[in-house]
Amino acid sequence: MRIFLVILLCLDVVFGYSYNDLLIDAQSRIYPKLIILQEGLTKQKEGDSITLGVVHMAEDEEIAHQIVQKIEHYHGHQIGVFHLDVQTIPFTALNPSMKIDALYLLKADAEHLKSAVAIGREKHIPIFVYDLNDLKYGALLALTIERSTVIYLNRSALSYSPRFNTVLYSIARFVNVGTD
């Protein structure tokens, strides 16, 4: 029995990070809705589209495509009054000149996460992460499933992010993590 357990643990290390389907499902439903809670978004983007970039490492390309499919299944290509465009973007291809209105960062090493967060801060856009622990790199928001679905807002990232409707601030739990 111990040998079997050790083999399972080694396989997880060999094949990389495993994602929780239930968490991905919840994030795919909620993250696009949170984008449209930005204050002043209607005036800025009226008649335009919103682009959400699902940023991933090369080994997570398949899971990124699955997330795009889930978001398109749940929301179609419409979120509120806006056309929703969801794209997969490798961390290595992400750059400040891309037209992106929000980032959804999958698991990556610290260097790639910090680089993506810096681009998001420069563009003044919401930065969502898959893993709550990745808020420490300066991302704005993480959604987890505990006893219920919980939205965590990184208080230290609020000064770099757009303002949101007060509804989000009233339902979110605030944490103080991250580097400046």
Image: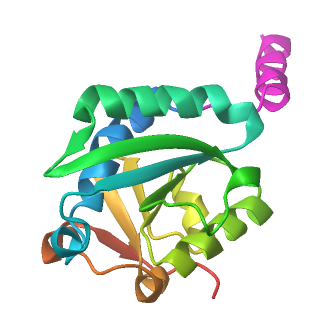
With 86 as the anchor, is 6 left or right in this view? right
User: Picture coordinates of residue 56 (x, y %)?
Assistant: 65, 44
What colour scheme has been applied to the protein in the rendered image?
Answer: rainbow
Image quadrant where residue 172 sits:
bottom left
Q: Nearer the viewer, residue 17 or 59?
A: 59
Q: Is residue 109 magenta?
A: no
Q: Which quadrant is home to the C terminus?
A: bottom right
Picture residue at 15% right of the left edge, 77% below the top: 166
With 92 as the anchor, is 99 left or right in this view? left
Looking at the image, residue 62 lies above or below residue 4 = below
Q: Which residues are magenta?
A: 1-18
Residue 147 visible to the viewer: no
Picture residue at 24% right of the left edge, 35% below the top: 75
Residue 153 visible to the viewer: yes
User: Picture coordinates of residue 24 (x, y %)?
Assistant: 44, 36
With 76 as the anchor, is 52 left or right in this view? right
User: Picture coordinates of residue 2 (x, y %)?
Assistant: 81, 16
Picture residue at 75% right of the left edge, 37% below the top: 58
Picture residue at 62% right of the left edge, 69% below the top: 96
Classified by dominant secondary structure, the portion drawn in magenta counts as helix
Looking at the image, residue 11 lies above or below residue 50 = above
Q: Residue furthest front?
A: 47
Q: Nearer the viewer, residue 37 or 179?
A: 37
Q: Is residue 16 magenta?
A: yes
